[in-house]
Image: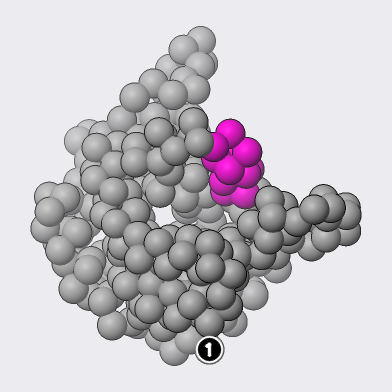
């Protein structure tokens, strides 16, 4: 998949592990795994269907109680599927072996319990933000002011920051949530620009999806669930590995997941 590849960039460069770097690494991971990403993305969309349908019904009925129930129940269903998406993307970024079906089944089984409460919190934000967005920008007679728009966008930006740093820890490590939150804060302080860039990438993608709807809905089954998250994790992956020792810890605990490279 030759997306954004500069063919005049010269001979591809590799790091000490034998991996391509930069845009060549992006193309390599995407080219080998895009079908897996698309499959996991479709599963994630199906997992979020109850939340989406419940939110749509709540908006049409203007019922906050319906919205609350949809967020809790829909988020509980969606959480394990979102964890599965993060797991699949991170496996691809570290070149972990294994078939898509086997890895997906294992990810769902391992995260089905731990992802319920984070899924509920995610559902509460997504449902509330979606409900508020429709009320503010579509069903209101007067368009909201600049301050309201900025607050709304900043809330989404903060959500993407927190989600992008929390879910990888959930799917990779067993630790208390207090430790995960502490790690998130320290990581943000150490790498503020990459974290902000990863969040902005996701925010811009979803803004374009909303602004150009309904035409962009045609792309949703193909790239909507996984592509912005893949781009964000690609930006952050080396920093995450450096800060948390992802690959060293995984190789120690699960030697069968260690990738092998040809000389």
Between 64 and 79, the residue placed more toward the observer is 64
Does the magenta segment cover residue 211? yes
From this view, report whether residue 213 is shown above or below residue 64: above
Q: Position of residue 211 (x, y in %)?
A: 63, 38
Horizontal side of residue 169 vs 203, given as left or right: left
**Which residue is most to the top?**
8
From this view, report whether residue 12 is shown above or below residue 115: above
**Main SS class of the magenta portion in the image:** helix
Which residue is depicted at the point 47% across and 20% down?
5
Between 29 and 16, the residue placed more toward the observer is 29
Neighbour tally class for label 1: few under 14, some 14-19, many 20 plus, Cα within 10 Å? few
Which residue is depicted at the point 72% across and 52% down?
137
Horizontal side of residue 256 vs 218, given as left or right: left
Q: Position of residue 141 (x, y in %)?
A: 80, 53
Residue 83 visible, this orientation:
no
From this view, report whether residue 255 is shown above or below residue 176: above
What's drawn in magenta, residue-wise?
201-213
Mark 1: secondary structure: helix
Horizontal side of residue 52 vs 151, given as left or right: left
Q: Position of residue 39 (x, y in %)?
A: 24, 45
Give the image's coloring scheme: one colour
From this view, report whether residue 222 is shown above or below residue 121: above
- The residue that mark 1 highlights is 178
Image quarter hosting the C terminus: top left
Q: Position of residue 114 (x, y in %)?
A: 33, 82
């Amino acid at each position: 998949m030759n997306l954004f590849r500069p063919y005049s960039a010269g001979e591809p460069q590799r790091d000490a592990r034998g991996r391509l770097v930069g845009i060549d690494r992006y193309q390599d991971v995407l080219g080998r795994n895009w079908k897996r990403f698309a499959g996991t993305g479709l599963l994630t969309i199906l997992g979020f269907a109850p939340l989406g349908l419940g939110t749509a019904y709540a908006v049409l009925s203007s019922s906050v109680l319906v919205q609350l129930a949809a967020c809790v129940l829909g988020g509980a269903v969606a959480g394990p599927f979102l964890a599965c998406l993060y797991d699949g993307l991170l496996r691809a970024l570290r070149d972990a072996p294994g078939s898509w079906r086997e890895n997906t089944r294992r990810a769902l089984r391992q995260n089905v319990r731990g992802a319920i409460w984070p899924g509920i919190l995610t559902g509460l934000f997504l449902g509330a933000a979606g409900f508020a967005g429709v009320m503010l920008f579509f069903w209101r007679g007067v368009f909201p002011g600049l301050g309201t728009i900025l607050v709304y966008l900043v809330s989404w930006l903060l959500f993407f920051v927190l989600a992008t740093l929390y879910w990888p820890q959930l799917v990779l490590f067993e630790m208390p949530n207090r430790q995960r939150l502490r790690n998130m804060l320290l990581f943000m302080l150490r790498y503020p620009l990459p974290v902000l860039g990863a969040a902005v990438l996701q925010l811009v993608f979803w803004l374009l999806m909303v602004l150009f709807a309904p035409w962009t809905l045609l792309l949703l089954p193909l790239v909507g669930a996984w592509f912005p998250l893949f781009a964000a994790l690609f930006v952050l992956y080396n920093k995450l590995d450096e800060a948390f020792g992802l690959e060293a810890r995984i190789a120690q605990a699960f030697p069968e997941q260690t990738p092998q490279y040809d000389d």
